[in-house]
Amino acid sequence: MQLPDELGLCYNDFVELEPGLGLGLLNYRPLIPLVEESNGPHQGRVMVITLGMKGRSCYQGKDAVNLEFQKGHTTISSFQAIPGERRYEAEETVSQLRVVASEALISKYVGHERATEILGNNRLNHLMFRASTPAAMSHASALLTHLLPCQDRLSRLDLHIHTLSLLNEQFNLLAPQASGGASPFTPGEIERIESARHVMSKHLDKPLTLAYLATKVGISKSKLKDGMIYLYNRSPAELLLELRMNKAIILLESGLQVSVVAWQVGYKYANNFTVAFTRYHGKSPKTLFGKKAVDPH
């Protein structure tokens, strides 16, 4: 669906993968401040996972519940046909990937009791707003190759697998499946583990160590290591490498020299960076130099 041209370049696409499970891409760059009224376009009760890829926007529900959407963050909500307004700023590009799952589909995969725990009881529930995990962004990047024009298309099976993997990650964060006991981490510990990931992402040029991160956020080294594996399915070293390699792609495509990028993601020598990048991505960093995605704006 595309809005009238006089409002700007504003469109969204939606693909139904199976009954009760859909994938949507929203790309808006309005010429004026834009307010869209919404009464909940989905039938029945649904959970919506929104991954912010660019920009920011907000949703203001008539019951005073507000939702924020922001680049690099995941917003999860559940609702049933509740009126509200979506708001977008003028001349600001907003790109969001959305996974929409019905209550029936969630119950099919995790059972009625766990589905109820995940969805909550109100007409509109703001379930979570947090920095997107590396795993979530990896799945989102793969899905974008299918939804964006002029990109390679995923097979229907790959599309389904990436979407269900995104859904499953959120299930585990919202309502961890019982495994013979309670979660091994308290809410405070999870907050510290997430803080350590944030420190990583902001200081990729520094020689970060497990000991430094643990001291910085106030948690033991073993707890931090186990916690990152629990939350992100990555060891601290694997997570740091993933963050560095993903950041490197962005910097290379912006036109920075390989040697400059190497320094900014924590490599003293460009040759060492080139080896690590090629091993991780399967291609040389020089192939991406200046290869910025086409964007008319």
Image (tube, rainbow, N blue to C red):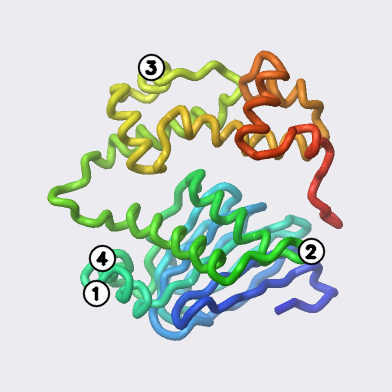
Mark 2: which amino acid?
Answer: Cys
Q: Callout 4: 10 Å neighbours few (<14), some, many (20+)?
A: few
Return the disc, 2 or 1, that comes first in the chain's sequence: 1
Residue 117 image-quadrant placement: bottom left
Is any atom of residue 177 visible in this view? yes
Left or right position of 207 against 211: right
Q: Quadrant of the C terminus?
A: bottom right
- 4 sits to left or right of 163: right
Contact check, label 4 and label 2, Cβ < 8 Å: no
Q: Earlier in the sequence, mark 4 or mark 2?
A: 4
| Distance from Cα at disc 2 to Cα at disc 3 | 45 Å
Rendered residue at 84%/74% (across/down):
6
Residue 101 lies, with reference to residue 173, above or below; the image says below
Determine which residue is flagged by label 3.
211
Residue 255, given in percent of the width and then of the height, sits at: 83, 34
What residue is pinned by disc 4? 117
How far across and down, in percent of the image, does residue 147 sit?
67, 66
The kind of secondary structure element at disc 2 is loop
- Earlier-in-chain disc, 1 versus 3: 1
Residue, far left: 180
> Residue visible at 49% across and 28% down?
199
Q: Which residue is mark 2?
A: 150
Residue drawn at (37%, 34%) of the image: 193
Q: Position of residue 192 (x, y in %)?
A: 35, 32
Element on which disc 3 rests: helix
Mark 1 lies on a secondary structure that is helix
> Residue at label 1?
112
Label 3 sits on what residue type? Ala
Q: Is residue 173 above or below residue 281?
A: below
In front: label 4 or label 2? 2
